Image (cartoon, rainbow, N blue to C red):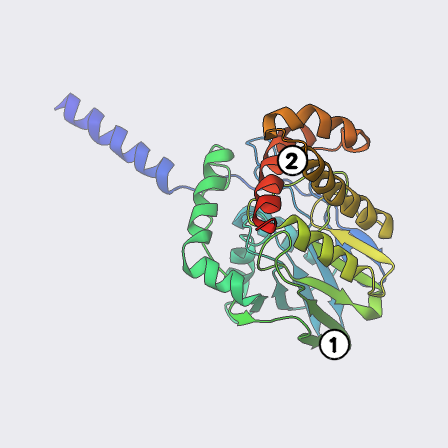
Amino acid sequence: MKRILALAALLFCSSVIATGRGPAVPDYPAEQVAPRTYVIHGPLGYPTAENQGFMNNPAFVLTAAGVVVIDPGSSVQTGEMVLRQIRRLTDQRIVAVLNTHVHGDHWLGNQAFREADPSVAIYGHPNMIAGIAAGVGDSWVANMEQLTEGATRGTRVVGPNTAVQDGDQVEVGGITFRFRHFGIAHSSSDLMIEVPQEDVLFLADNATNRRIIRMDDGRFSGNIATLEAAMQLKAKVLVPGHGKTGDWALVRDYRDYLAGLKAAVKTYYEQGLADFEMKPRVAADLARFADWSGFDDELGKHISLALLEIEEESF
């Protein structure tokens, strides 16, 4: 009987662990970057138990008709933290959540806003909506929970319910949110968001500030072209997907990294070098970026991906 009770207790505890909820994410300050626009700058790096998976830049805009949230983070806990920061400034209703692309570190926080208001509209690119329907969201939930050692437990998939494409816009309280999509860049679902009344452009992960990120779902040529197109837009405040808000210098820097890497890989490919032989030479060519977060971790992968892209373009 004692063994049976002990086994029952063990199964009960295992069930609690499996179905419980991760801890709250500590409060991060909302920094005002424009008259009505605030950004919560997440730490640089990969999802870990220490950062509880929070590493992107959730943002929100206060309008006369309510609050518009952009990319509420990687978990329900992060989304709740973002909501707490909003409530420090206003009691206005959350009227819309805008998602920039399919990678879950940017949008799994949707859950917190849908739980606070089941009627809230969530916007995203059609390719993002299709990816979630195909199971991308479930994969991100599982990966985040594993990488954070359970800190994001309790998060579930709550994707966009309204599709928007290049040129579409949403008007809220006299503020315009205009969506820009120039093809496959960091992913096939990237939406940059212009807020002209604030002179703000949300870059999504098409550009980051002093942070090198994955390109598994993107194309170097497309990302470079997207940033070139973005440079024709009018904005003074540039909010990257990761890293501090800045000006056009951060866009040029990230464009230079992408273009410099692809050009170096092409040169060494034409010399007959394999990707592993290229790596020390490419690293030397891109030395100005060596102190960026993620450089050492992503460089080899980026070389391999750029090489595949160059080989494809050669046919």
Instruction: Return the residue at label 1.
Output: 173
Residue 205 seen in render:
no
Residue 10 percent coordinates (x, y): 27, 28
Name the image quarter holding residue 288.
top right
Residue 48 percent coordinates (x, y): 56, 32
Residue shown at 54% from the left, 47% from the top: 75
Residue 258 seen in render:
yes
Quadrant where the N terminus sits is top left
User: Which sits in the foreground, 31 or 204?
Assistant: 204
Residue shown at 61% from the left, 60% from the top: 99
Q: Is residue 117 above or below residue 78?
A: below
Residue shown at 70% from the left, 45% from the top: 242
Residue 94 percent coordinates (x, y): 63, 66
Q: Which label belongs to residue 158?
A: none
Name the image quarter holding residue 26.
top right
N-term mark: 1 or 2: 1
Which SS class for mark 1? loop
- Single out the residue that lies furthest toward the left: 1
Residue 132 percent coordinates (x, y): 46, 58
Name the image quarter holding residue 102.
bottom right
User: Which sits in the foreground, 271 or 289?
Assistant: 271
In three-dimensional space, the C-alpha distance between marks 1 and 2, rounded to whole angstroms, equals 53 Å
Which SS class for mark 2? helix
Instruction: Return the residue at label 2.
Output: 269
Q: How many marks?
A: 2
Q: In the image, what residue type sits under mark 1?
A: Gly
Q: In the image, what residue type sits under mark 2?
A: Tyr
